Structure formats: structure tokens, C-alpha cells
Amino acid sequence: MRVRDIRDGLFHVNEGKTEASIRAVPIHSELAEVIKNRTEGKKPDDYLIHEIKRDTKGVLRRSAVFVKRFGRYRDKVFPEYRSNGHRQAAKVFHDLRAHFIDERLKRGVPLEIVKDCVGHEQEGVTLRHYATKASI
């Protein structure tokens, strides 16, 4: 995400895998100060998280480098996922999306708002693929 994509209290997502990826997402009040500090003094084309670069050979996209860093962090914090061969079974980068959906639904955010935030247009995708089942 670039600085130019952050305005009017919104993250403007301008590209993605599908047309549904393109949307505006409100910046949470608890994140507003962090975003303000990260954008201050930067040019519109600068990245919000400028510290992330392409891999050393310039081959991988910035997002791939971020995912790899997350994986190393996950392995350090949750070594059990690395040692038992279930690396993809839990605590993968994409789990942050499921966590976001779960936490919003648990807090009573209406499903339609959650769907808008994550870009789900097709009926049932949010609950079928991302939200966890209620515990007994």
C-alpha cells in the first residue's frame, strides 16, 4: 500500500486478485496514529511500510518478502508448527484474514460490514471459508 492510497480515514485498495478486491476500508481509530506517523513526510508514491524491500536478488515481490518474514517470526513464536510438519496447517499469513473476520463477528459487527471490509461479494463465502464455528 502506498501513501496515496490512504486518505479520508480510509485505506483505498486499488488492485487485487478479483474485482471485489477493489474497495475502501475504514482505518480503525486505534490504528489512526500509527498510520499518521507512517505517512508523515512521505511522498504519495512511497510505501506505507517502506522498510520492506524486494528479496536480495530482486525476484520476489515485496508481499512475498513480507510473507517470508512473517513465517520466520511465526516459527520463532510457535516452534511447534515448524517441528511437527504442520507449517501450513495453522498460523500462516492468510490466517490473519480469518482472525480479522472472527474477531469482528464475535464483537457483533454485522456480517454485511465484515463482508464489505474483506471484499466478499458472493453469498456465504465469509462464513463458509473464514469464520470459525462457535465453541460449545
Image (cartoon, helix red, strand yellow):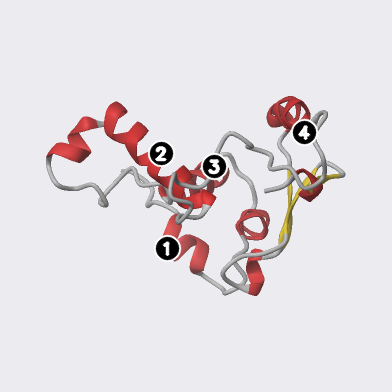
- Which residue type does callout 4 highlight? Thr
Quadrant of residue 46 within the rendered picture:
top right
Residue sitting farthest toward the left: 84
Relative to 63, residue 123 above or below: below
Q: Are marks 1 and 4 in contact (CB under 8 Å)?
A: no
The residue labelled by disc 4 is 39
- Nearer to us: label 2 or label 3: 3
Percent coordinates x, y for residue 52 in the rendering: 55, 39
**Within-10-Å neighbours for mark 2: few <14, some 14–19, many 20+:** some
The residue labelled by disc 1 is 129
Work out how far the residue at label 1 is from the one at label 4, CA to CA, in angstroms.
34 Å
Q: Are marks 2 and 3 in contact (CB under 8 Å)?
A: no
**Within-10-Å neighbours for mark 3: few <14, some 14–19, many 20+:** some
Q: Nearer the viewer, residue 42 or 120?
A: 42
Q: Nearer the viewer, residue 52 or 91?
A: 52
- Which residue type does callout 2 highlight? Phe
Percent coordinates x, y for residue 73 in the rendering: 36, 32
> What is the secondary structure assignment of the residue under circle 2?
helix
